[in-house]
Image: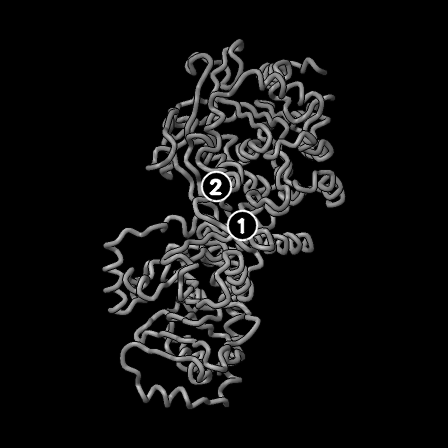
Amino acid sequence: MIVQVAVALTAGLLGWAYLAIKPPPPKICGSPGGPPVTSPRIQLSDGRHLAYKEKGVPKEEAQYKIIAVHGYDSSKDLDLPVSQELIEELRIYLLFFDRAGYGESDPYPERSVKSEALDIQELADKLHIGSKFYVIGVSLGALLAGASLVVPFVHYWWRDIPANISREAFNTMLGQDQWTFRIAHYAPWLFNWWMTQKWFPSLSMMAGNMTVFSDPDLEILKELSKKPSVGQEKIRQQGMYESLFRDIVVAYGNWEFGPLDLPNPFPENEGSVHIWQGYDDKIIPRQLNRYISEKLPWIRYHELETYCSEMKNWIRRRDFFNCENDRRGMFTEAVAVLWVGVLLWAFQAIRSPPPKICGSKGGPKVTSPRIKLSDGRHLAYKVRGVPKEKAKYKELIDELGIFIVTYDRAGYGDSDPNPKRSVKSEAYDVEELADQIQLGQKFYVLGVSIGTYTTWACLKFIPHRHFVKLPIYVWLAGAALIVPAINFWWPSFPSELCESEYKKQPKKDQWKLRISHYVPGLLYWWMTQKWFPSCSIMARDPIIFNKRDFEILKKMLQVPNPNEHKIRQQGEYESLFKDLMVGFGSWEFDPMELENPFPHNEGVVQLWQGREDKLVPVELQRFVAEKLPWIKYHEVPDGGHLIIHDNGLCESIFKSLLLKQKPTFM
């Protein structure tokens, strides 16, 4: 069993990882269900499409042709504040395009620094830009080699930048941004999870954190807010992962080169490369761009505002003795990122959503009568049959003069969930229900399938009890367990018999039961993950039904259940999943150690089992009946799991229970 638990935990961790990090599929423009294509596009050699926009004088008349590369969370509708007068005076042709995954350009799963440059090359070729053009890259778009890099992105793990300088610049960033960039670099497969989780702040820009902008930035933003933002709604329309998230993953990943590896592209001064940097830029630290410009003197570096000579000297002082320690620190950070990620996967993957409690704000309406239990919860119920004052039996079937009470167990239908739900608590819910509706001195309890753990609990905890509202004692008159669910971990089962019958269960149900028993905290993840089949019943797998079950199902489908939609309305976790955790968890008692609740034959306990039941092993049921000889065991030869829904059998069950008649099928 320990090995099985270990395997279950390992499978669970792997499943968490996959589900948490797996990005949603992109909504590709022009595909079924995707956004429409509204811009001109070229088709690249790999089949992708690249959307573009032209501005300025016609390219055939242009003296200067410029390809503008937009930055993070932007698009080809980037508004460069270049006056029309300047455009006409210098005869400028501007070409904007959506980088892969942005706007209307197809996503590219293999996107890299190099592929971005090749996209520009193909774009220029396909549009016949000519033999000479300029490139302007803005912010994250400046990761391309170009002629003008405006506030260019910097990479804190470029191999040719001294670690102490990278660390100094990195430490100027907000803590949430440091973690974002660490994950993008060390664990890019975690990035989708990091950017979508709600526990910790991730990227400050996306959170609307204005502290990342300097005072001049805020003034510019104020002016920009007065203008309509053309095409803003298209930027992320194909999905945030393929646009924003992949941008950061590529930018902070492992590059094919370092910036200091670049030779001067214009050795004869036939062109020039410029870097424009803001002194007060809080998003792109100036330290790294200063260092790069000093190491590459062919770059013309422009820093707006005061350039401090002391800072120049600090940059020139490179303490190589501390570099190795810095790299070790980076490795420690990488390990910390991975470990924190695994822990947070675990919590987020197994955490169930809050229930939609009936009658609460945003929850389903209460449509049934309910009682209020002593712990504040509500229990919904339904009555039928003759009035309880005239009823001879407090159970089913009108012809016998029976008063029937059915109720929603905790978390089902209109009954409130019970976070502390247990086998024992279910019995006390029945006790309070009987008290509050004044059921009388004597009643029967009947349970079906997994609901029979409530019946077992009633036999254990309330066979004879004091009526709270009246000064008298009342007791169970009898109980029926119909195809009762078997907990394979009841201590009294012989291990060989139990293991043999357990292995006859479908594999997916074996895993469901293991997880419910050994690691119930994983059950929500297991029942909602899509990797592996999890539960035969919820999947409506036909292998769990026998021939007679199919006949019963056919008849049941002819009579629709008007309230079926209400069963899980408060959430599958609080109803179905919690049922499995309680039913197959560790009980407060072993049913096979129960004493006869009716030693003087003043009541009866019956157990009904279908011999061909594929959900509940008949061999284990027989063992229970042998261990508890005071239980009257009835085995239906051709019965499956749905015998309670067979009209003839249902009548036999209740006549046997109430009138002690011999079952007709016998």
Q: In the image, is residue 526 above or below residue 356?
A: below
Q: Are marks 1 and 2 in contact (CB under 8 Å)?
A: no
Q: Earlier in the sequence, mark 1 or mark 2?
A: 2
Residue that label 1 marks: 521
Q: Dot 2: what SS?
A: loop
Residue that label 2 marks: 421
**Closer to the camera: disc 1 or disc 2?**
1
Q: How is the image coloured?
A: one colour
Residue furthest out toward the top: 399
Q: Which label number is shown at residue 456? A: none
Q: In the image, is residue 242 above or below residue 655?
A: below
Count of numbered labels shown in the rendering: 2
Asked whether residue 202 appears in the rendered view, the answer is no
Q: Dot 1: what SS?
A: helix
* Along the line of sight, the residue nearer the viewer: 269 or 103: 269
Q: Is residue 160 left or right of residue 606?
A: left
- List x then y, in percent, for residue 74: 39, 57
Please tell me which residue is depicted at 65% across the width and 32% down the height of the picture. Answer: 541
Asked whether residue 203 appears in the rendered view, the answer is yes
- List x then y, in percent, for residue 19: 55, 51
The quadrant the C terminus occupies is top right
Q: Residues within 10 Å of mark 2 (few under 14, many from 20)?
A: some
